[in-house]
Amino acid sequence: MRVEKAVIPVAGFGTRFLPVTKTQPKEMLPIVDVPVIHYVVEEAVASGISDILFVTSRGKRAIEDYFDRSVDLECLLEHAEKHQMAKALRDISNLADVHFIRQKEPLGLGHAVLLARRHVGNDPFAVLLGDEVFCGQTPCLAQLASIFDSLGGPVVAAQRVSKQEVSNYGIVDARPLSDFLFEVQDLVEKPRVLDAPSDLAVAGRYVLTPDIFPLLSATGPGSGGEIQLTDALRQLARKRTVYALIPSAERHDVGNPVGFIKANILFAVRRGDIGPAVIDFMRDLLIHEATRGQTV
Ligand code: UTP
């Protein structure tokens, strides 16, 4: 069965990004001039997804508005002969069939995914975290979906992280099948460095099967007092083969200020229109800062 439905949980508080996230969803922060969530949806669509369920919460209305038509604005742009921009705005609302469900309390990523149960039904589905952006020739989710198509089991994206970082992630105990593909033996959410079974961290893309739902409903609060998707995946891996794939794609965790700034710089310098000006600015800035360092 092909993966055509995706769940995008965006109901978290985004505390690492306060105060801006007090009133603004972190998923709507721009990478240059395009909101983070736009890249996530584009990746899903380019991977064959046609139906997207956002798990939202209070204060996330801007995401709903972004994927809706903005007829007034389109008319204004058409009037001003800015036809291309009007079309670009219309195209955003036609990207996919989008649905929204509310998570009334931020009880954790696992709880957010469980809310998609009725919408997903008996189909395999993708989960994309709304604060991670992947860049690469083949979309990250398409790479996971292709493993799902050939091997028929759930697949999580993984990436190698440094020792200092293992306690920020779900870490996989994995048996290698190749340099990039692994069979998941076990998973631990945010382990201490000494307890981490490997340096292979779960990244924010998953292809899951509906048998995850009963496991999620039986999962109690775990790390941080939240219902963790990792804990349910751990149970799933005991029942069937779950795969982990290191995708050939660059991952940007834009849910924290440093990752966000790095992504903005990278995307800006790679853009044909503004890239040269940004590079000039950065060269001058670095020279200026280096000389200042010498004179202090
Ligand atoms: P994060 O922990 O990275 O996001 O959750 P957060 O809670 O929004 O941010 P911080 O840690 O407070 O800075 C990973 C993803 O799971 C979603 C988040 O929106 C994010 O996309 N999530 C998390 C939910 O949808 N519901 C939750 O209860 C928790």
Image (spheres, rainbow, N blue to C red):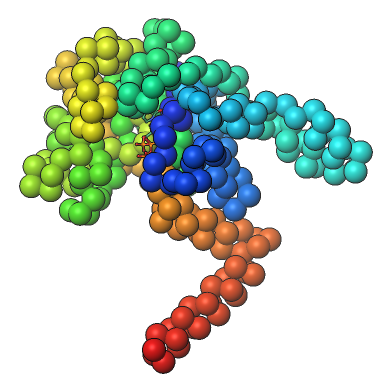
Which residue is at a point 85% across and 44% down the rendered structure image? Answer: 82
The image quadrant that residue 189 belongs to is top left
Instruction: Answer left or right for 185 relative to 288.
Output: left
| Residue 284 visible to an observer of this rendering | yes
Instruction: Indicate whether 267 appears above or below 209.
Output: below
Q: Is residue 57 left or right of residue 151?
A: right
- Closer to us: 259 or 50: 259
Taking depth in this image into account, of 129 and 42 the one nearest to the observer is 129
Locate residue 45: give its quadrant: top right
Q: Find ligand 1 in the image and state its quadrant.
A: top left
Q: Give percent across and percent down for residue 48.
A: 52, 26
Q: Position of residue 280 (x, y in %)?
A: 60, 75
Name the image quarter holding the N terminus: top left
The count of marks equals 0
Provide residue 198's location: percent of width, then percent of height: 14, 44
Q: Residue at x 55, y 50 (%)?
A: 31
Q: Residue at x 75, y 30 (%)?
A: 70
Q: Is residue 276 left or right of residue 112?
A: right
Residue 257: x %, y % from top left = 43, 53
Is residue 252 in sight in this rendering? no
Residue at the far bottom in the pictured view: 295
| Camera-side residue of 76 and 278 | 76
Figure quadrant of the C terminus? bottom left
Image position of 31 with respect to 202: above or below: below
Kindly identify the residue that appears in the image at 81 percent across and 34 percent down: 74
